[in-house]
Each structure stands twice: as C-alpha cells, then as structure tokens.
Image: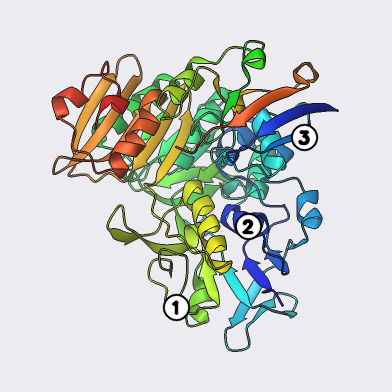
Amino acid sequence: MPDRIVIVGAGQAGGQTAVSLRLMGHKGPIVLIGDEAHVPYERPPLSKAFLAGDVGHERLYLKKPNYYGDHDIELRLNTRVTAIDRAAKTVTLGSGENLTYDKLVLAMGSRVRRLDVPGGDLPGIHYLRTLADVEEIKASLKQSARAAIVGGGYIGLEVAAVLTKLGASPVVIEVMDQVMARAMAPKVASFFEQVHRSHGVDIRLKTGVTGFEAGSDGRVAAAITNSGEKIPADLVIIGIGILPEAELAAEAGLTVENGIAVDEYGRTEDPSVFAAGDCTNHPNALLDRRLRLESVQNAVSQGKTVATAIIGKPAPYAEVPWFWSDQFDLKLQIVGLSDPTDEVVIRGSVEECKFSACYLRNGIFVAINCINTLRDFNAAKKLIAAHARPDPVTLADPDIALKEFE
Amino acid sequence: MSKIIVTDREGVTTTIEGDTGLSVMENLRDNDFPIAAICGGCCSCATCHVYVEESWFVKLPERSEDEGELLDGSGHMQPTSRLSCQIEFTDELDGLALTIAPED
C-alpha cells in the first residue's frame, strides 16, 4: 500500500508539497489540511496588487480550485489540527476527528506577531497575513480618513505605497532608526524613506506605539507613541513581524528551536514527520548555518524537497534566499542575507532610483539589494551562491555586467 | 478554445487548451508544467522563462524594459526569450509555440 500523506497547513509550502508529490508519481492518499477558507494561494500580492484591487482572489490561487479533486488530493479547508499523536500516527482535528498518516508534513507557516498594548484589539486595528485579513482592511479603507501603519518592514511599506496610490496619506511608525532594518543597510533604507516621504508618507522612526485610543464610536481613533504623542488614525495596520507556527510540533515532542528543526531534506527526528516552509529551522550548506526564513522561495523549494524525500529520492535543499518587494515605482529584489557589519558597495545611480547595494563580508559577496536593477538579480544570485570575491571597485561600475564576473 | 504548444525541458511536446484572460505562465502552471513562477507573475524572479517559437515571438507585444533586464541577467537568455508571466494569452495567440527554458 502506498503511504498515506497528511499535510498540515495549506499555504504555499503545504500546497507545493501536495502538488509535487502527485507530479513525482506518489499514488497514495494525500490529505491537505488548512485553517483558512481558501485553496492554497500566494501571499505576497496580499500587501501589493490584491490590496490595491488590481487582482481578484482567483488570480492568487496556486492551482485552480478543481485541481485538488482532479488529482485526488483531499483538501480540508476551515480545519484546524489541534494535536499530533506520533505513537499512534494520527492528527486530531478541531472537530475531534482523528486522521491517520504514514507520513506527516508540517507546513503551518507563520502567524503575525501581535502588538500587546492597551487598546490593541480595538475595532479598526488590523493585521495583514491572510486573504481574509486583507478583505477586512479593504472594507475598512472605504470609510477611512487617516491610516496609521505600525512597522516599517516590507509589509508596512508596501501597504503605505498602496494606500498612497489609493489616495490616503498614511503614517508609518517604526521603532528602529531605519526602515527594513533586517534587509538593508541604513543608506539604502534612507533612500526608501525619502521616496516614501516624497509621495506623502509620514515616516516616524525611533517611535514606539504604547497604546491606542478609541473614539466616541468605540473604534480606534489614535495611536499613542512612546513620546506621548497621539497620532490620529481611524484605520491601523500592524506589520511588526511574524512568528513560526511550531507549537503543534513542540507539543508532539519534536525539537523546536526558532522553528521546527529539520535537516537539509526537510526531515525531523521522527522518520515519519517532515516539515517545510516558514515554520522550519533548517540547515543551509551555502550559508554554512541553520536558519528560519519567511519567504515564498523557501516555502516552495522546501515543499519540493520534502516531496522528494517522501518518495525516496531525497535531494538536499540549499539555495541562496531571495525576496522581492514593490513600493511605488521601486522594484526591490533581494538576494542573500546581509549583516550590519558588511561592506556596502553601491553600483548605479541612487539619484536615478536605479542602483544595487552589494554586501561584501570579508571580501565575499553575500547579499544584494537590487533597486530597479533587474539585470543584476539573477547574475548576483549565481555569484553569491559561488561565494565570489568581486573586486569592489569593478563591482561599483554599473557598466560592467555582473554576469561578466567570475 | 485556443491552444498553446509546449515543449518541456525533456523535449516532449504537448498541446494544451489555453485560458484566455490569464497569462501564459498561469496556463503553464495550471497544466503542471515545471515552471516555478515563484513571484506569481509580477516580473520579479525570471523563474517562468520560455523560448517562444520565432514566428510567434515577432507577433507578441514587445518586452518591457523590466522584463528585458531581468532576462538579461539570466544565464540562459536567447533572442526569443520571454517571461511567460508577461504574456497575456488571447485568442489571437491560438497555436502559440514555446519551449520551457532551463532553470537558472
């Protein structure tokens, strides 16, 4: 009898695992369990084109809704898994029903980090992670006169750009002294801050939110900062990071250390249990360390990795992480993980909004932020994976294509 | 229904019924061709790279600057390279023939 596979989480990693298993010829039952109402969909457009109203639901779906039935994948939506019994090889659903498995894949993804302050759950305060979240935000936007965004990361800045395009003048409140601090050097971040400000976004750095105040209608009316200032806002969107959904694994006795611990094949210490995507902590031979990633590229690649391991053709996963973001007319593409102590080499023109920031660590090319420099993106990916040591002076010359480097 | 003739990386050619109103990438993805299309069609990754048969290539709207630059960074760019997410499939493209490019 071919294995019965149960996948917990119907996001990009879970969806990809199911699809890849069928593509790779797995004949046994596949059950894909998701706690949202939708078939697996792409999250990145939620804070971009979908929020802007440029695309509808159906363009976000990884596969058409009928795909799962057509490929004998049992899709159980609106369903939570509450426990795993590894000895009995079962998972328990919110309804109390138990499902048996031969192989279990944990792909629960992430959940938003919540801002635990007085007034933090007032009506009008939103987080942005799911399609349903964005539907609510879109509904609130219609009546909103003043929006505040807490967090100047990708989500906050993408939302700020979309709201501006829709005619609002949002305030972005960021606790650090720069935006997108995890992704880029201060001088690149300051370029983004200037672009946002030039479009009318009010960015407040080094500002924490200590609470929210309600108006006479009971809805949020202001965000209160650590300096005591009240920033009027009838719509608040909080984007202060995400946390791995790993409790289910921890409760089942699996090792969880900043994510569910897996090896390069997506295997946990239990030979019947695998994990993929945001919820994992995994080794990466190219980076020579373990890490947890919050990205689509990782979710998709690890989903495929787990599928290959399950069908008995394991192939190790090691890719340089990459990400993208769209804000106003800026197409941002990021490869690798930079560090505040890296040397930063700028190639191109900051004034013309077309430049790359290349990060060198002890001379080794480790990361790049491409700002409207799409030509650099794939070439940099290869150089970073190869641990190239480009000459910084040559690297700074945008007329020398990155693909010419060795 | 209008058709798309797809040659995969193993050289196997298949004809699929294309949905108009979707991109060529979405049609390839819906039919389980092995394109990653990780960025979902926003011209940010080049993982939906195809070579369009020359007689069709010339009929397509030209590449945007972004698409051209993204392809230029790929190690597999050819004169008929396109990102399939940037081609909207229409009835006028009935019979569109393409080959899936190697992965970068």
In terms of image quadrants, where is residue B49? top right
Give the amino acid at mark 2.
Met
Colour convention: rainbow
- Which secondary structure, mark 1? loop
Q: Is residue A374 left or right of residue A367?
A: right
Confirm whether circles 1 and 3 share one chain: no
In terms of image quadrants, where is residue A203? top left
In primary-sequence order, the first of circles 2 and 1 is 2
Give the amino acid at mark 1.
Glu
List x then y, in percent, for residue B30.
71, 41
Q: Is residue A358 above or below residue A294?
A: above
Residue situated furthest right in the rendering: B1
Pointer 3 residue: B16
Q: Chain of mark 3?
A: B
Distance (Cα) linking label 2 and label 1: 24 Å
Q: Is residue A277 left or right of residue A286?
A: right
Crowd rating for badge 3 (residues with CA inside 10 Å; few <14, some 14–19, many 20+):
some
List x then y, in percent, for residue A7.
63, 66
Q: Residue at x 74, y 28 (%)?
A: B4
In terms of image quadrants, where is residue A151? top left
In this rendering, the count of numbered labels is 3
A227 or A68, which is in the foreground?
A68
Distance (Cα) linking label 2 and label 3: 20 Å
| Residue A112 appears in view | no
Pointer 1 residue: A269
Crowd rating for badge 2 (residues with CA inside 10 Å; few <14, some 14–19, many 20+):
few
Q: Is residue A351 above or below residue A45?
A: above
List x then y, in percent, for residue B89.
72, 24
Crowd rating for badge 1 (residues with CA inside 10 Å; few <14, some 14–19, many 20+):
few
- In this rendering, which labeled residue sits more in front, label 1 or label 3? 3
B16 or A304, which is in the foreground?
B16
